[in-house]
Image (cartoon, helix red, strand yellow):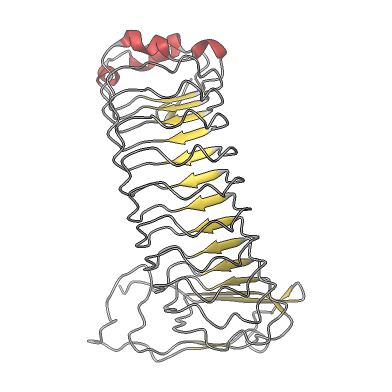
Amino acid sequence: MAEEKPRAQIEIINNNEMVPSDPINMAVLQSPPTSTPGSPTQGMSEPTNHNTTGEQYEIEGLGPDSLEVMASHARLVEIGDMFQGMTKVEALCLRQNYIQRIEGFEDCGEVTDLDLYDNRLTKMEGLAAMTKLTVLDLSFNGIRKIENLESLVNLEKLFLISNKITTIENLSTLTKLKYLELGSNRIRKIENLDSLQNLEQLFVGRNKITHIEGISCLPKLRVLSIQSNRIVDLEGLEDNVDLEELYMSHNGLYELKGLDSLTNLTTLDVAANRIARLSNIKHLTKLEEFWFNGNQLEEWKDVELLPYESKTLQTVYMEGNPISKDVNYRRKLMLTVPSLRQIDATLCA
């Protein structure tokens, strides 16, 4: 049975009314010829349907009154003058196409949300006119450098997941930025974030970072994720006293040190490290979730060092540690931490 290919998803909203989907009034897709047996695309199974013919769907129904355009899996190769004269459009979703260049947005100064996730972009460009952007998603492309964002002074969320970025740079004008996602790149150092005084959430998982640094300048940081990097200690967090969620799984941690000032933590994830002793966490009296699975804890007496007296701790993950082989593992945890509602993936009875 042939595998079902992703279907094009096209929606156009004009003056808050979506174009009807009947054959007469809908935004029509003119499909290019389908692949024939033996062609380069025949039988391929990929996240996006690579357009080897260079042809693309034609999107009809666009006009000066269009407010939102969603064109996913539409085989778009270039933007060209598609959005010329569309001065009222506020949201553009062009994800999972084959677009190679950001262009043609000169008239789109009212756009607040631009989604170019999973295309073939290699450069950040063509965004100067979009000064009202609050959300920009350029994830899953081939971008090598953060650049040409100077005019996006209203940006609040920036997604650059799974590109080829090596350096955090050129963000100084994004003073309203609250959410920055740089996971799955080639970054070796956290740096150049000084101007992001309103940043609340920072994600740099799956990079090549060896030290926690460059974040003491972020007074409003609440969520920090540095999963799957090369970090061996937790030094460098002492100034981030408002931190509520810290994700440090899949690193090379040997011990829990450097958490003294993080008394507002509600979630701590240090799973899949090399930690053999529980220490320096009893003062975390607001902790609700503690992820410690896949470590090397052997001593039951260390479990008593969990901040159980505050009665806020509700979820712990301890599977994959030597203590989890104890037949009374769950019972002992529940007796030690009576507030628990979930142990590993199972709710407490």
**Quadrant location of residue 63?**
bottom right
Q: Residue furthest left?
A: 38
Q: Residue 258: x and y, percent?
A: 41, 24
**Quadrant location of residue 27?**
bottom right
Q: 320 or 214: which is nearer to us? A: 214
Q: Residue 298: x and y, percent?
A: 26, 15
Count of marks, rendered view: 0
Left-right relation of 172 to 228: right
Q: Is residue 41 above or below residue 338?
A: below
Q: Is residue 36 above or below residue 134?
A: below
Question: Residue at position x 68%, y 71% from top?
Answer: 90
Left-right relation of 59 to 25: left
**Quadrant location of residue 60?**
bottom right
Q: 328 or 261: which is nearer to us? A: 261
Q: Is residue 253 above or below residue 13?
A: above
Q: Residue 308: x and y, percent?
A: 49, 13
Q: 333 or 98: which is nearer to us? A: 98
Q: Quadrant of the N terminus?
A: bottom left
Q: Residue 31: x and y, percent?
A: 47, 89
Question: Residue at position x 55%, y 29% from top?
Answer: 241
Q: Residue furthest right?
A: 15
